[in-house]
Amino acid sequence: MPGTKNWVLFLLIVLVAACRDPQPDQEAVLKRGEYLVNIIAKCAGCHSPQGTKSLGDPMYLAGGVVAGTINTPNITPARKTGIGAWTDNELESLLRQGLRPDGSDVHPVMPSQFYQYMTDDDLLAVITYLRSVPPIENFVPPTTEFPFPASQYSNPPDPAALSSEDDEVLYGAYLANLAHCMRCHTPSKNGKRDYENQLGAGGLEIDSGSYIAITPNITPHETDGIAHYSVDDIAEILRTGRRPDGTQLLPMMGTRELHRATEADRHAIAKYLKSLTPKPNPLGE
Ligand code: HEC
Ligand code: HEC
């Protein structure tokens, strides 16, 4: 009978489709992507001009002058001036290795050294979300002069290599890595961030453009660090941007973003900080 074969094939396809795992929930992927881009990995904080860091803002993710002389590229899906024409593989190489499609390196102020440890699922969520935001054609001239030399950036530790029995600590380390906390909270030695010996010891001087801050020690060191804060205290500092004594943290700390993180995630980050090896304050370069 002509057509029988087609029917059998059709039924087979239906059966196979029905037995396959359900498609990953697109809504959940987008939600995770939004969370990472805006709150944890803070792409929006750097890639949106000041004051336009939320979806719906006219220049959201469209790039421009962000701090001092640094121009960040347009990462909306605009085809001419954004990432609309980039493939997923090209975006992955950029995010994980800091390599542009033409093989050139981006300046490491773009935190690929941290994003290299992003899980495949999270990477996919970030890319899926970036493709979903409104495309904005906005040409951003490349930065010609970076205030910090590329050589000053070094590789942070892989959070998955941390030895801990506590899943919450491990997840906190993963999130803190994406939030590149240690890039600000680790001092330099010989002109390079010393993640190996002084992770979290603070003492780095950072010029925001309008003020200069010296980062505090965020290891649980008795006298120099955060031993006097409980996990709940730290989670609360991250939520409110205020210390238990009422003093307000400088906006550079990123509490504007962390304020929107989930309670569980702030708690995990706090627990990770408390698990760090206590380090004394650095004695200076
Ligand atoms: C600390 C600021 C900062 C953060 C956070 C940041 N970026 Fe970047 N990003 C930059 C800068 C600066 C450049 C350009 C570097 C250069 O000019 O060499 C860049 C380059 C890029 C590029 C290359 C675009 C092009 O046209 O060359 C992409 C794509 C990108 N970032 C995506 C992201 C994503 C996605 C995130 C979050 C997961 C993110 N960035 C987080 C600062 C940042
Ligand atoms: C852009 C640089 C930067 C990044 C990224 C950053 N911080 Fe900070 N952080 C600071 C500065 C600067 C201060 C001090 C602010 C002040 O004195 O007002 C600070 C203060 C703190 C404090 C208060 C310490 C105390 O002694 O009271 C904690 C806790 C902290 N940061 C944790 C974190 C965590 C966790 C992350 C990542 C999720 C993070 N920081 C990311 C710059 C940064």
Image (cartoon, helix red, strand yellow):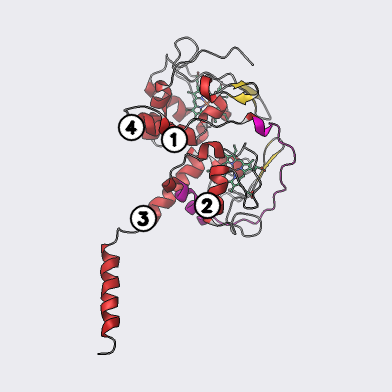
Expressed as whole percent of the image width and height from the top left, the position of residue 122 reads: 44, 46
Residue on which disc 3 sits: 25
In the image, is 95 to the left or to the right of 240?
A: right
First-in-chain label (4 vs 1): 4
Task: Kindly identify the residue that appears in the image at 25 percent across and 78 percent down.
Answer: 8
In the image, is 48 to the left or to the right of 217?
A: right
- Tell whether label 3 touches label 4 (CB within 8 Å): no
Crowding near pointer 2: few (<14 within 10 Å), some, many (20+)?
Answer: many
- Tell whether label 1 touches label 4 (CB within 8 Å): no
Residue farthest top in this picture: 223
Which quarter of the picture shows residue 21? Answer: bottom left
Residue on which disc 1 sits: 175
Labels 4, 2: front one: 4
First-in-chain label (2 vs 1): 2
Along the line of sight, the residue nearer the viewer: 7 or 37: 7
Position above or below: 276 against 50: above
Some atom of ligand 2 lies within 8 Å of the CB belonging to the residue at label 1: yes
Position above or below: 27 against 277: below
- Quadrant for the N terminus, please: bottom left
Residue on which disc 4 sits: 167
Give SS at disc 4: helix
Give SS at disc 2: helix
133 drawn magenta: yes
First-in-chain label (4 vs 3): 3
Q: Which amino acid type is marked by label 3?
A: Asp
What distance separates the C-alpha of mark 3 from that of mark 2? 17 Å
Q: Which region is colored magenta?
A: 123-151
Some atom of ligand 1 lies within 8 Å of the CB belonging to the residue at label 2: yes
Expressed as whole percent of the image width and height from the top left, the position of residue 263 reads: 38, 33
Residue on which disc 2 sits: 130
